[in-house]
Amino acid sequence: MAVTVRRRVDFPMIDMADIAFYPRIYDLAHRCFEEAWALMCGVEYHEMLYEWKLGYPVVDIASTFHGPLRYGRTAVMTMWIESVGTSSVVWRYRLEDDLGNLVWTSRQVTVGVHMDDMSVRPVPEDLRRYLEACTPPEGA
């Protein structure tokens, strides 16, 4: 199961070429990442950070920019889980505009950490069940 998040491309996101400035794509991805926790696991990311003391910072990232994301369009970010490890979660991102044009793809590895000391923490079993339900079927 993948989740899809839509967001308008606002003026502060663009550069002089009238396209989304590339750091804004990463910011958009992180905003979708935060929203995805509620959609995938039924828990708000801020609740995990402040109440559970559990965060998932990115430790590895690979991205490809395929085309421009223009001002006035809607960003359509589809996300799914590639795999869940002992303490890591591998996320896949596909960003298109509202016309269906491919803009950006990314594979990001996050690792569970305790927010007080950044020590590595295993993926809690209740989250694991939800996250694993968001992985594609074998061979997909």
Image (cartoon, grey):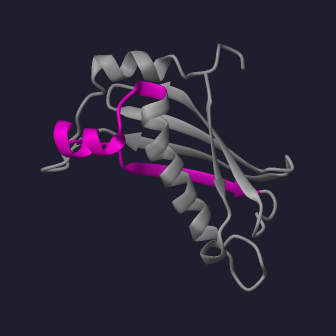
Q: Which residue is pictured at 62% across the width and 28% down the height?
A: 2
Instruction: Please indicate whether residue 57 sits to the left or right of residue 36 in the image.
Output: left
Q: Which residue is pictured at 53% across the width and 47% down the height?
A: 32
Q: Is residue 11 above or below residue 43?
A: below
Q: Is residue 31 above or below residue 42?
A: below
Closer to the camera in the image, 84 or 17: 17
What x and y, as percent, mark residue 125?
30, 17
Q: Quadrant of the C terminus?
A: top right
Residue that lies at the very extreme toward the bottom in this rendered image: 16
Instruction: Please indicate whether residue 58 sits to the left or right of residue 26 in the image.
Output: left
What x and y, as percent, mark residue 111?
35, 40
| Residue 124 covered by magenta stretch | no
In the rendered image, which quarter is residue 11 located in? bottom right
What x and y, as percent, mark residue 129?
40, 15
Instruction: Please indicate whether residue 117 sits to the left or right of residue 126 in the image.
Output: left
Q: Which residue is pictured at 49% across the width and 45% down the height?
A: 33
Report the magenta residues as a range: 40-65
Closer to the camera in the image, 11 or 40: 11
